[in-house]
Image (cartoon, rainbow, N blue to C red):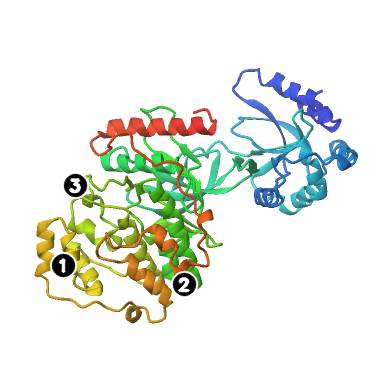
Amino acid sequence: MAMVERFDLLFSLGKFDQCNRLIEKNTTKGDNLQNQWIVSCNMISSQFMSTYVNDNNICDAKTKPYQQYIKEQQTIISQIRSAPLNMAQLQLELSALYNLCFIRIHKENVGCLYDHQFLQIIKETLIRVIGQQDWRHCGLHQDTTELLFLALQQVHDGQKTGMMVKEQEFKVGPRYTNLMYIGEGAYGMVVAVHDNVANEISSRFWVGQKVAIKKISPFEHQTYCQRTLREIKILTRFKHENIINIQDILRAPTLDDMKDVYIVQCLMETDMYKLLKTQQLSNDHVCYFLYQILRGLKYIHSANVLHRDLKPSNLLLNTTCDLKICDFGLARVADPDHDHTGFLTEYVATRWYRAPEIMLNSKGYTKSIDVWSVGCILGEMLSNRPLFPGKHYLDQLNHILGILGSPSQEDLDCIINEKARGYIQSLPYKPKVSWSRLYPRADPKALDLLEKMLCFNPHKRITVEQSLEHPYLEQYYDPADEPVAEEPFTFEMELDDLPKERLKELIFQETLDLKKKMGIES
């Protein structure tokens, strides 16, 4: 009897142990191919699986056994095992075993599955989505630790380990496929992809998620290496709903071969910059977005970190109005006494959101610089126009003073740089412009908060915690639901002086540490 026919017969009889032994026997024949049983045409909707399983909270949920359903469960499972799968004929196929996806359904949850008619819905869904997805259904069988075992394997043609997007090669296959361009910056491109392996999140498995991958090629430039290392170090340690996460990092297996780094993150549909280009926000949207920005920033500041690059394009959004802060490449540990001689040179594309003290001083930066940026973003959300669109250094100062008015003597005294202070004093007097004149339709409470955020003197500027307590945000303010970091974040060494070769080694080590933390072999 041919191997395929023998496997077919064993499977149809429910003799799964013998099926496994047959597979194991044929994996030892040497040509680097592994036998994997599949159903050729039973393509299951990954979208259905991720939505249904998680919405019903039945996957990997450690619930108590449903004793009253045990007999019914056993009957159902026996029927499933003995009934032929009428959507396609089982066959054994030799293929390179690139990856497998598993949905593990524990014994305790079979009652849950029975209640939700899970198995019946899978059958109905298979019929509806056949030919629409890239998954092949591998069948159901009993396991010693799990009553049901659903394995999914994606079909690959062997050509998709590297895929081109706008003349950029993404070596992220075969796990990540269906790449779609999102955007790019100075040293990286971002694409949306299908993740074809189940990811365990909160002890539940999602199948076939869409995620975002940012490709970074930093190793020719010391500055790009610094930014990449900062972002990886910070985001692998931060955990907050309003801060983008890092799910995985891909790179070449050896340090010498590592030319690119691929950072895998959750996919968000758009960002604040794109949103403000297309539509006017309601006051409710402005309030909710501002609350989420401040909620995430509270966590960042509690870790003693300055973001330093808050702007609309670094605020990611999805269709349910969830907001996540991203791009920590310019972030630093807060150190008011540090001489930030290289600080200003990094601020190129973010001039419009730059606090005045950054342009006027050489040291003394505090968390208030991020609050200024949030104030600029708030003004932009109210009008869909940048508040201070300076064309260069002096023009930026003129825009700020043109609205805030000339600073008082007390405010001038906080400017440490004598030349900068002298320049401000040499300018003709400018009166303050009323915020209600600039934003006549805005909520007065929003304008009151805006004024407190955009205070010229950083020592008088409102803090993040005070902003969250402001009456404008009272409908959302909940200190019990505004978590802070467990401990302050620190860099073991100052990155500014390290050569790019050493920075590359540190980036490689960070990826190793992340894999170890995730329990994945590198």
Q: Name the N-terminal-most of marks 3 and 1.
A: 3
Q: Name the kind of residue labelled 3 in the image.
A: Thr
Q: Name the N-terminal-most of marks 2 and 3.
A: 2
Quadrant holding the N terminus = top right
Q: Name the kind of residue labelled 2 in the image.
A: Leu
Residue 409 shows which numbered tag?
1
> Which of labels 2 and 3 is toward the front?
3
Question: Separation of disc 2 and disc 3 at Cα?
Answer: 39 Å
Mark 2 in CB contact with mark 1 (< 8 angstroms)? no
Q: Name the kind of residue labelled 1 in the image.
A: Gln
Query: Looking at the image, is 143 positioned above or below residue 486?
Result: above
| Residue 407, percent from left and from top | 19, 69
Regarding residue 467, the answer to whether it shows in the image is: yes
Identify the residue position indicated by label 3 in the image: 341
| Residue 295, percent from left and from top | 46, 56
Q: Residue at x 31, y 57 (%)?
A: 368
Answer few, some or many: residues within 10 Å of disc 2's Cα (few below 14, many 20 plus, some between 14 and 19).
some
Callout 1: helix, strand or loop?
A: helix
Identify the residue position indicated by label 2 in the image: 281
